[in-house]
Image (cartoon, rainbow, N blue to C red):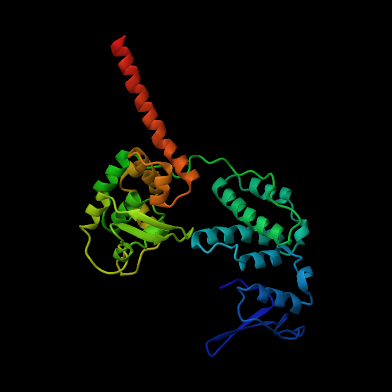
Amino acid sequence: MVELPKGVQRVVTRGREYFYWHPGRGTAQAGKRVPLPSDPKTPEFWIALREAQGLSGLVTIKTVGAVIDLFRVSKAFPKHAGTAGMYERGLRILRAGFGDKPAEALHASVIREIVEGMEDTPGAANNFLGAIRAFSSWSVVHKHLAASITEGVKPYKSKGGHKPWTDAQIAAAHEHLTGMVRRGVMLELYTGQRGSDAVRLGPTFIDENGFDLSQIKTGREVWCPILPELAAEIATWERRPGPYLLQDHGKPYTRKRLSIHFNEQRKGIPELEGVTLHGLRATAVVRLRRAGLSTSQIQDVIGMSMAMIERYSRFADRKASGKAAVVSLAERKKNA
């Protein structure tokens, strides 16, 4: 449900929703009730609302809150639940401080102050900045803002992000993880898919010894081969329709629920301290790089941007380079 501004009334009659602009309803100062379009997720709804408020046309887009409302129902707003949630959190911060202020009052200095005020939580600060950057770009293109409000605002430096798992950590996962958590880890480890896609996988996704899927976040079509290690795991799972990962009550896993259950098991496995499920995406890249696949081949298998593949591949390349250096030094010493 879209968050409705104060003064908007929602009425449900015979299973249908109706919306009205009715400021001061139930008080002596109640205004005239004005019907609005039936879908608050459309720009037409918000345009009609501004007109009911005594405003009209583009001139109505005066406040930061009004621009946020239009952005949230635009095609630019992400469909992926995780990204959409991150955007919503960032926009709530902006709305809380500046929702009723004129959009022209927003400047990069304001956003910089907010980001600097979140220095104790750099991850949250970077997520906020990412959401506002998207909001700012869309608003400038649609002439709701005169200029970018994030220009020159720098994110906090990453402390490494989701690192690949080591060989010892992978071995510990094989040995100690159990049940659906183990299945989930194996699916993410050997496919390199995001958690939101891994929890969807099941027999119906298999096409010629690979998973054929459209990634939720990007919409990218991917054919991910089922590696021998994963095929051996799947062979031990019971055969039934639906996703491979089901909770005890039979409901499919979500990415968030799998993470919660993984963290519960991880606490009893010292080798897995500090690892994340998303780190398995990087791990899959490293494994494929070690196997000799090129960046473009890994992109086809996992469905990841080349920039991210190159970033994750550095872990494998640095280790391979270091091992080669040790061998080279040993050879020189032997021949000296």
Residue 20 is drawn in which quadrant?
bottom right
- The foreground one among 23 and 78 is 78
The quarter in which the N terminus is drawn is bottom right
Q: Is residue 119 left or right of residue 210?
A: right
The residue under the point 37% across, 23% down is 325
Up the image or down, 153 lies above or below 241; here it is: above
**Residue 51: image x %, image y %?**
75, 77
**What is the tally of numbered marks visible in this picture?**
0
- The foreground one among 103 and 101 is 103
The quarter in which the C terminus is drawn is top left
* Residue furthest top in the image: 336
Up the image or down, 218 lies above or below 290; here it is: below
Query: Is residue 100 in sight in this rendering?
Result: yes
**Residue 70: image x %, image y %?**
66, 67
Q: Is residue 17 left or right of residue 269?
A: right
The residue under the point 68% across, 74% down is 46
Query: Is residue 260 in sight in this rendering?
Result: no
The residue under the point 29% across, 47% down is 173
- The foreground one among 257 and 164 is 164
Q: Is residue 104 left or right of residue 192?
A: right
**Residue 58: image x %, image y %?**
76, 69
The residue under the point 56% across, 51% down is 124
**Residue 208: image x %, image y %?**
29, 59
- The foreground one among 284 and 259 is 284
Up the image or down, 165 lies above or below 107; here it is: above
